[in-house]
Amino acid sequence: MSTNETLKVAVIGGDGTGPEVAAEGIKVLKAIAELEGIKYELQDFDYGGDRYLETGVVLPDGAVEELSAFDAILLGAVGHPNVAPGILEQGLLLNLRFAFDQYINLRPVKLFPGVETPLAGKGPDDIDFVVVRENTEDMYCGIGGFFKKGTPDEVATQTAIYTRKGCERCIRWAFEYTHKRNMKKRLTLVAKTNVLTIGHDLWWRTFQEVAEEYPDIETDYNHVDACCMWMVKNPEYYDVIVTTNMFGDIITDLAGILQGGMGVAAGGNINPEPGGTSMFEPMGGSAPKYTGKSMINPIAAISATAMLLEQAGHQAASDRIMTAIQTVTGTKMKSQAAGKMGYSTQEVGDLVCKAL
Ligand code: IPM
Ligand code: MN
């Protein structure tokens, strides 16, 4: 979008502490919009576990069409203690990722100043990389089935699909991103070519071919198991990682804890095409036990808001928020853990606004 158009943001607070953290993201969005002269429109949507329990539907008819009128979605969290696992995750999160063809899942892994990492001897200079996770294929496609279910001879299949189009667009985007990020200019493909000799061979070949178009980017390859080891031992090696959906899911939880945990880790589900609707979220879950207690850390949701602004073309606004976050983690907050921040959820949001 052009930067003087009105930015239209749909807010899905979702379950548990989701609405509380999303509210702090929106508080910061309003503050920066004022400072940077950004025109915006916000609309709340009550999708989530409570609505599902009342109506029996996760996303009502027409929801996707309605949401498609927005430039971006800010999602708080999904996951409700009274709803069976999978229903909200599939019905809301995965459904929207697929419906809007958000084929990039962008997960920055940056240790902010003042934030504790479980890695001994590593600091903010060592933990600063980005994972580009493919977001529409792999085992997430839901293809498979049962045969003789519930009998001793039961068979279950769950298929991973990889398409040339799907991996190429993700890999190309990752090269572009590595170029634009302009740091180490190193892109590492993470896969499992020694076992997944079909699907990941497609990824490998595509990666090699696209690499030829980017001679300024150094390329490397890690098997996913080795990547988990290196990420703990030498996180400073990484600049940008590009990987498949399932492996990306797993390694970004590992990466998330290295950067200080789910209170700070944010991600974007991005459809980079013109007019695409992207969705940004803190990576932590709905943390039901903290609901309504003002104890949950909103930093991840505020980071997600900064990512939203960057994707919408408001780079300066996004940078200002990221700098303000680092001032707050570096000089104010005692911890990033819920209830141990030294401030309430709302006070942390206020501190970030003040630091803008
Ligand atoms: C994530 C989550 C989701 C995923 C779940 C909730 C479906 O773990 O965003 O990483 O597996 O992608
Ligand atoms: Mn995950």
Image: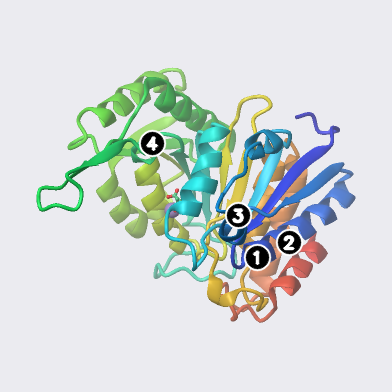
Residue pictured at 50% horizontal, 33% vertical: 103
Q: Position of residue 189 (x, y in %)?
A: 36, 36
Residue under numbered circle 3: 55
Residue under numbered circle 2: 23
N-terminal of the two: label 1 or label 2?
Answer: 2
Q: Residues within 10 Å of mark 4 (few under 14, many from 20)?
A: some
Label at residue 298: 1
Q: Is residue 188 above or below residue 149?
A: above
The quadrant holding residue 346 is bottom right
**Which one is in front in this view, the residue at disc 1 or the one at disc 2?**
2
Q: Residues within 10 Å of mark 1 (few under 14, many from 20)?
A: many
**Which one is in front in this view, the residue at disc 3 or the one at disc 1?**
3
Give how far apart the Cα atoms at labels 2 and 3 are: 25 Å
Q: Position of residue 183 (x, y in %)?
A: 53, 41
Q: Residues within 10 Å of mark 2 (few under 14, many from 20)?
A: many
Residue pictured at 44% horizontal, 64% vertical: 122
Element at badge 3?
helix
Q: Position of residue 62 (x, y in %)?
A: 66, 36
Residue under numbered circle 4: 141
